[in-house]
């Protein structure tokens, strides 16, 4: 086994755990993290996710559970729900400056681990 890869991952996990406990860092459960990552990945590739894209047919949880997690992310100011200009019944999920800072901090951790 490549122990340097294992060590790098364990350093990252340790740093992530410390950062997640820091004051001001958003407390997210695994489902919220996955939803936020899905929105960020879609945004990075130029796409947009609708609330329905997350809620319906998603193995992460029931529609009610996922709806609560989306509301929680919005209440934490990590995402915004934006009405579609074409159809006000459709709402897109958009990252906020706070979620940008969240991903920047995670990126800093990856760089820190890769530099060591």
Image (spheres, rainbow, N blue to C red):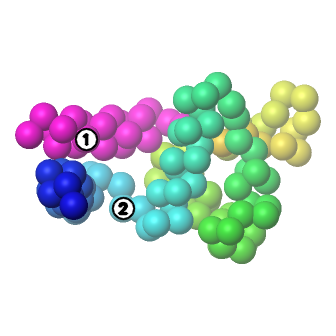
State the residue at coordinates (30%, 37%). Answer: 107
Residue 110 is labelled as 1
Magenta stretch contains residue 14: no
Residue 18 x %, y %? 17, 59
Q: Residue 95's quadrant in the figure?
A: top right
Taken as a whole, is the magenta stretch helix, strand or loop?
helix
Which residues lie in the magenta part?
A: 95-116
Left or right: 56 in relation to 59: right
Looking at the picture, tell me which residue is in the foreground, 104 or 75: 104
What residue is at 58 percent from the left and 64 percent from the top? 69
Instruction: Give the mark nearer the N terminus: 1 vs 2.
Output: 2
The reply to whether residue 103 is visible in this rendering is yes
Q: Secondary structure at mark 2?
A: loop
Please state if 62 lies on the left or on the right of 41 as rendered: right
- Taking depth in this image into account, of 27 and 110 the one nearest to the observer is 110
Residue 54, label in figure: none
Q: Nearer the viewer, residue 5 or 50?
A: 5
Left or right: 26 as drawn, with respect to 54: left
Residue denoted by label 2: 27
């Amino acid at each position: 086994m490549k122990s340097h890869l294992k060590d790098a991952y364990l350093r990252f996990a340790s740093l992530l755990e410390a950062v997640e406990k820091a004051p001001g860092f958003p407390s997210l459960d695994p489902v919220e993290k996955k939803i936020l990552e899905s929105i960020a990945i879609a945004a990075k590739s130029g796409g947009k996710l609708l609330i329905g894209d997350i809620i319906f047919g998603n193995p992460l949880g029931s529609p009610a559970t996922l709806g609560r997690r989306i509301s929680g992310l919005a209440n934490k100011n990590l995402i915004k729900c934006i009405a579609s200009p074409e159809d006000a019944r459709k709402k897109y999920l958009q990252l906020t400056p706070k979620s940008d800072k969240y991903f920047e901090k995670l990126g800093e951790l990856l760089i820190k681990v890769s530099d060591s």
